[in-house]
Amino acid sequence: MFPARDTEFLWMSAIEPKKPVTQTMLTVENEVGTIEYDFFLDPVEPFPYTHFSMYFVDPIQSFIQVDLTRYSKISFKIQCDPKNVLLFVLFSFDDKVTDLKNMATRRVSSTAFSCDKHWSDINIDFDSLDTPHWWLGRYGFEFSDTSYKLNKTMGFAWVNSLQSPINTPSHVKLTDIKLQGADSRFFYGAIALSLILWILFVIWQFRRYVIVLTAELKEKVRQDQPLIAYAKLTIEPQRDKEKTGLFRYMATEYANPDLSLELAAAALGINRTKINDILKDELGLTFSTYLNKLRLTEAARLLSENEEANVSEIAYSVGYNNVSYFSKLFKQEYGCVPKTFKNLYQNKDDAV
């Protein structure tokens, strides 16, 4: 705020008293770079009072109230000769008593600090300010009502205290007056921007995941398709009729919901152990595992080729009477439920 004035907060200086009261007086020596003023407190007066103040104004120099809630404290450098105890005062608008035409009605909130002939860095938290009892009593407030509204700040002042030197010329230098704290507009703006970027990142990651998953699904379907046609397996029909018969039988009967190891053994005249041995030697799978793989591979083909495919109908067509069980097995095999598989596989925009 000073010496480089913030264009957001226009202010004008004022002193009290404007004219000497008996011997009590304040005179300003300088307001360029450093505020310098002298004051003298009459020893005869019971409560001699002086202050240098900064009032917020509009462009036509009318007193206004400003919102400082985005700031948490004020800092300044000060030098006092002789040693002094001053008050930092914040003036605020009080809805019950303040009249903008009568500055004596502004609410006063203050705290004390010490200074001497050496430069001191003073930091004052706005939360540390209290309205004194004399002001509360004057306007009929309870002594517990010591708070004020920072969003209705009218100005600041540097005021003598009851411990200031009496009957002694005092000199004060003041500079580097700064409001400090986070501007909530930038804070919330940063949060909003971070949230937007995070959402965009999640969307991008999800799209990449969809693309990769779609490519993996298509490659898996391509690799599994030969299982449907037993003739494409590495079988030599003339040399091993049992093996040929088993794969031909399963390739044509897998859609039968009642197909089982026992039923296959009876139909082929091959014992159960032999069937499992053939499948393990050829594919490394058991009967039930190979049967499910045949069914799921065919289901995947139907889902990928038919845009109007109905999951329930496809489940029944490949030998599953229980749609939930079919969806569970399909997800274990392809990493997603049948409906998602269909949407991903048929989305031409996600092909890689």
Image (cartoon, rainbow, N blue to C red):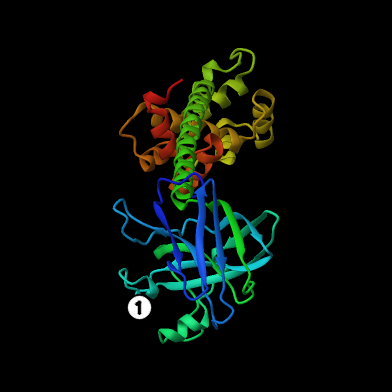
Q: Eyeballing the image, is 230 above or below 238?
A: below
Q: Nearer the viewer, residue 58 or 160?
A: 160
Mark 1, Cα crowd under 10 Å, few <14 / some 14-19 / many 20+, is few
Q: How many marks?
A: 1
Name which quarter of the figure residue 246 lies in.
top right
Residue type pointed to by label 1: Val
Q: Nearer the viewer, residue 329 or 87?
A: 87
Q: Nearer the viewer, residue 146 or 175?
A: 175
Q: Position of residue 238 (x, y in %)?
A: 60, 12
112 displayed left or right of 156: right
At a point 40% along the width and 63% down the height, the residue shown is: 154
343 displayed left or right of 235: left
138 displayed left or right of 166: left
Q: Is residue 243 among what the camera can see?
A: yes
Q: Position of residue 149 (x, y in %)?
A: 43, 68
Q: Is residue 322 among what the camera can see?
A: no
At a point 41% along the width and 45% down the height, the residue shown is: 7
Q: Secondary structure at mark 1?
A: loop
Q: Position of residue 102 (x, y in %)?
A: 33, 72
Residue marked by disc 1: 97
Name which quarter of the figure residue 129 lies in.
bottom right
Q: Eyeballing the image, is 252 above or below 129?
A: above
